Image (cartoon, rainbow, N blue to C red):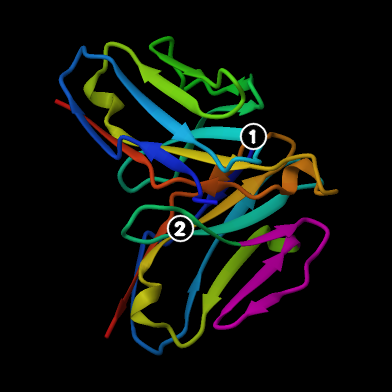
């Protein structure tokens, strides 16, 4: 069985602050993929990033960065200099040997002006 | 390419009625998924198709639920004798799996905007 835990239900920050969204996963598979999706108020899930279990290099894309640590089974997501448009629900997801994605319960991020 | 389309976007029905949702995936995508999302939760897997074959069904998919993808293109999800517990957002996603040298597990799902069901 696989499981994704996003312990932070809601986070509120002021614009330009940095914020980190935590994701902890469980799987018995040795090969697996981790994903982050963003769900803005419009409701459509938007893909942000995919990492495989063999690549622990951190990744940066503009104001977004991801920290993957197999030792702690974590795949955390940091937004630097947050903006109001970053307000959304963010989901971490895992796919191992199963064909479907298993999602966490999401973190509601609110960025205040 | 217009992305994944779902119809209707909103459906309000009375308990006991049947409802049907339609999903039109990205045209070249061979996999199609249905997920259900309730308020404050992440999407939960219901079922998926590879072309026209339904390859996996979640235990969440009771016998009142049926999904089809008759020609490997669009898909329908029907809920019979709706119950108030069926109220949720029903999400469809599609992906291109097993091609272009991408491992199956790595394929990225593209989601539609969802169909919101309210059962009174």
Q: Label 1 belongs to which residue?
A: B31
Residue A100: image location, x then y, percent: 62, 36
Q: Is residue B32 left or right of residue B92?
A: right
Residue occupying image coordinates x 71% and y 60%: A51
The picture quadrant where one finds residue B84 is: top left
- Is residue A67 magenta-colored? yes
Q: Relative to residue A35, is residue B72 depicted above or below? A: above
- Secondary structure beneath dot 2 equals loop
Local crowd at mark 2 within 10 Å, few (<14), some, or many (≥20)? some
Chain identifier of the residue bearing label 1 in the image: B
Left of B14 or right of it: where is A108? right
Q: Position of residue A97 (x, y in %)?
A: 74, 36
Magenta span of residues: A49-70
A20 versus A26 height, above or below: below
Magenta highlight on residue B99: no
* Residue at x 78%, y 56% (from the top left corner): A53
Determine which of the numbered discs, if any, sits on residue A7 in the image. 2
Residue A111 location (% of width, % of height): 33, 77
Instruction: Give the label, 1 or 2, closer to the camera.
Output: 1
């Amino acid at each position: 069985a696989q499981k994704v835990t996003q312990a932070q239900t809601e986070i509120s920050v002021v614009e330009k602050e940095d914020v980190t969204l935590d994701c902890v996963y469980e799987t018995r598979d040795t090969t697996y993929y981790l994903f982050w999706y963003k769900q803005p108020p419009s409701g459509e899930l938007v893909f942000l990033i995919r990492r495989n279990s063999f690549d622990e290099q951190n990744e940066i894309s503009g104001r977004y960065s991801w920290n993957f640590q197999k030792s702690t089974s974590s795949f955390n997501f940091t937004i630097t200099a947050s903006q109001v448009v970053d307000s959304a629900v963010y989901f971490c997801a895992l796919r191992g040997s199963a064909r479907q994605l298993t999602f966490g319960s999401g973190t509601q991020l609110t960025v205040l002006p | 390419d217009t992305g994944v389309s779902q119809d209707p976007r909103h459906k309000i029905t009375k308990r006991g009625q049947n409802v049907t949702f339609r999903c039109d995936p990205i045209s070249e995508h061979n996999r199609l998924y249905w997920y259900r999302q309730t308020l404050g939760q992440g999407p939960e897997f219901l079922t998926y198709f590879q072309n026209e074959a339904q390859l996996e069904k979640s235990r969440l998919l009771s016998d009142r639920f049926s999904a089809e993808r008759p020609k490997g293109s669009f898909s329908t999800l029907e809920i019979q004798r709706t119950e108030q517990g069926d109220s949720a957002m029903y999400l469809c996603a599609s992906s291109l799996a097993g091609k272009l040298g991408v491992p199956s597990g790595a394929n990225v799902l593209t989601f539609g905007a969802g169909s919101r069901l309210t059962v009174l």
